[in-house]
Each structure stands twice: as C-alpha cells, then as structure tokens.
Amino acid sequence: MRRPVPGQLTLALADSVPDDTSDGRGETASRRGVSPKRAALLQRAKIKGRDQTGTEGDLLERIADEGNLARALLSVVRNKGAAGSDGQTVDDAEEQSEALLADLHQALLSERYRPQPVRRVTVPKPDGGGDRNLGVPTVRDRVVQQAMLHILEPLFDPGFHEASCGFRKGRGAQQAVSQTCTHLEAGYRVVVDLDLSKFFDRVHHQRLLARIETKVADRRVLRLIRMMLKAKVAMSDGVHVANEQGTPQGGPLSPLLSNIVLDELDWELARRGLRHVRYADDFLVFVRSQRAGTRVMASLRCFIERRLRLKINDSKSGVIQPDQASFLGFRFECEDHRGIAVWPSKKSYQRISRKIRELIPCNWGNSLEAVFAQANLYLRGWMAHFRLCTEEAERAFHALDAHCRRRVRAIIVRHKKRRRYLRRHLLKRGVSWRAATGAAYRCRGVWRASNHAGMTRGYPNAWFKPRLASLKERWKELNPKPLGPNEQEQLVLL
C-alpha cells in the first residue's frame, strides 16, 4: 500500500521549553536576540518546572507551580493570538511576566482566581456553510488553561483510544490518514460520515465534568474547570451572556476537553467492533456494505443524540464512498491493483484555487517580489499539510503550479501597459519577433496573452523555479523515493 512514511510529518510542540538559555555553542539568550524577559522566563521554567510528580490530591499545587506557570506563559507568548476581553496582549503579558506569574500563583492557591469573560469572535467557515463561533479567553486565562493542560493531559491521554488522532502528542494527521488507508485496504470501503453540528457549542457541562471526575480527585481543580466552562461570553456589542453549555473553541484546554467528551464515543465504537478514525470532532466509520452503513448510522445517531446529547448535521452526514468523503481535507480513491490513492478533496482544491486568485491577482500593481513573498508563504504552508498525498496527486499539484505561473505572467503583461512596450520587453528577453508580436498584438485581453507562446518563451518554467514555490517539487522534496537495491548497494560501498 502506498501511504506516507513515518517521517512524513514532524510535530512541533509549542509548549516545549529548552533545557537551557544557551544553544550549546556558548551563546546566551541575549546574544541570540532573546529579550531579557524571555530569558528570565526560560530560566524560571527550567529551574522550578522540574518536579511535577505528586499525588492526585495535589493537582492544584502542581498547576500553580511557578515553573509550570512560566512554561505556560512561554507557550502562550509563542502562539501569539489576539487579546481577550480585557485588551491585554501577549507582549504586555511578557513584559509584566514577573508580577503576572506571582499573582496567578497566589490566586490559584488561595482559590481567589476567577476566569474573565471570553471574547466572542465569529469567522466564516471555509466551505461557506455559515459562521463559526470562536471564544478568545484573556491572556491571563490562557496561561492558566495551558498550565492545567500540562498537568491534566498526562492523566487522560494514555487512556484515549488509538483511533483518536487529533490534538495528542505524537499523533496527528499522518496517523489519521494512515489508519484510513489501512481500513480501506482491508476491504471496508463504505464510509459512514457523521458531522457533529456545532460540537463545541453543545458540549454538556455536567457529562463532561463527570468524565473528568473519573481521573481528577482534587475538588479544587474540578471547581476551576467548572468556572471556566461557565465563564460568560463577551459579545461584540459589549453585552455579557451566560454560558450554560459548550466549551470555548479557542482556549488551550478546549482540545483536551473535546477528546474527553468524544473518548466515550471511541470506546463505544470499539465495543461494537466497528473500525473508525477520529480527529477532534471529525470522524469516519468504515463498513463493508451500504446496508451495514445505513444500520450503523441509525444506531450511532441514537447514541450520539441520546447519550452524548449532541446533534448530527444531516446535510453533511451520510453513507458514502471514500472518494466522496472529505476528511482533514483529503479524499481517498480505492484502486484494486495499485492500493489507496490519497488526493486533496474537491473542497480543498477549490479553496486553494480561490486563495491563489487572491494572492496572485492579475491586476497586481506592486512588484513581483511582493507577490512571490506572500504566495510562497501560503503555498509552502499548504504543502506542509498535503504532503500526505500519494503520487497520483502530482497531476493536481502540476495544474496548480501552471495556474500560478500563468497568473504571474498576466501580471507582467499588465505591468507593461502598452502593447509595443510588451513586444519590446519580450524581444529583449530573447523571444523571436513573430512570437513577441503575437503575444502583444494578436491576443485579446491580458489573460489570453499570458498563455501565448511569446510569454511562455520569455518567462519559461525555469525562470520561476528560484522565485515561486512549486507544489509539485515541494511534494517531491518531502516525499523522496526509496532507494532501489542497486542504489542501496552503491550507498553502502560509499
């Protein structure tokens, strides 16, 4: 089976803290350009954050440890993020780190800490299906949530089902795609796609706290989590609204809480002997026939709505074929003789096509260097995720590369303004008089001229190679072909 190799995805943990303020070459933090405040935080996290062992009853003391809080503040600062309802930015918090950490340490241990209202932010969904509500806690509250995550995650993560791949250390999209390919290759080629409607807004607080209580014996920590769940929501008009259900999608603790809620679903599917893969609130169930899929979907609907008290989005759920599903932006094609092919989904392809039109507009008035800078940043980030596609997707990457190059050529045509200037420019670039004249005078419109032989000869693909990122070439770099027997033998001899 053709699937991503184990080294295909490297996970960078945001909450990891260096063991020292030097880089191993004798350079201090200040010499590397790190601010004194950041260096002090690193030192405090290293010295006071070592001993995190203890009993289940002293979780609050471990959360409030100044070293743990320093690590949490470092993580929040590195992740950037917008200001909360109080207007404090991460830069302000870093400058006031000493006073902030001391205040949080005392407030947590004396149980005087109270979460502030969560700022509501509404962003449009990528597929155009309405808006998504995000909750932005204050920087102070994000530090506390991150500190809680450091202590609570080791308690819950070992007990999570292996089919859960989202927001877990050492697991991610690579594992989810690999498991999906394994189930499809085993013959389970009918997919039950269930979409949870507004999952983060409908989490039942009492059920969630009951699940947390099975691993957390410290009542003070349970009370702290309850206060965070019940924190009011600050709307854009300044009104504070009470929150009776749901967990804010945007806080550091939200991914862990979502995994705790849906872990019950994972083990229920395992108890029934069903194969499935889950990444956060996106999950697929694999069966062998359409009839089995219809039966499984009906039974899971009852469990999710009655037991978990969540709702299913009927318009986005169904029993479908693998190539119709969109899981983490991928679709899967089952080829009897060649295995499982992994492609970008149709929605992902449409989304990046729209983004390319935004990043490389044909009426671009600035320099080409500016358009290359912003396009390369997005294209490299996009391929960092879609590197998990198999070699069949090279055709799609090649088409996107060609579209990017044509749009850049259209910008060049527009920059020349007059036809005689364009012909003169192409002649200077070594294009024949006939091809240059055809591109300048025989094409109606900028878009047609951008694909004329005169433009493609004046600006061949080789001209773009050092300037514009190529999705196809980047995929090849991230997925090198394994060495053959002869090449391996030559490498051993060398």
Image (cartoon, helix red, strand yellow):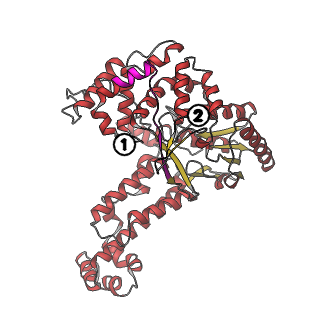
Quadrant in the picture for residue 212:
top right
Asked whether the viewer can see residue 155, the reply is: yes
Q: Nearer the viewer, mark 2 or mark 1?
A: 1
Tell me where residue 454 appears, x and y as whole percent. 34, 78
- Pick whichever, 249 or 102, lies toward us: 102
Tell me where residue 244 appears, x and y as whole percent. 60, 38
Q: In the image, which disc is placed on residue 487?
A: none
Does the magenta portion include 17?
Answer: no
Q: Neighbour class for label 2 at 10 Å: few (<14), some, many (≥20)?
A: many
Residue in view at x 34 percent, y 41 percent:
89
- Circle 1 residue: 87
> Mark 1 falls on what kind of element?
loop
- Circle 2 residue: 259
- Pick whichever, 31 or 462, lies toward us: 31
Among all residues in the image, which is located at the extreme left?
31
Tell me which amino acid carries mark 2.
Asn
Residue bounds of the magenta highlight: 102-122
Tell me which amino acid carries mark 1.
Gly
Does the magenta portion include 104?
Answer: yes
Among all residues in the image, which is located at the extreme top?
55
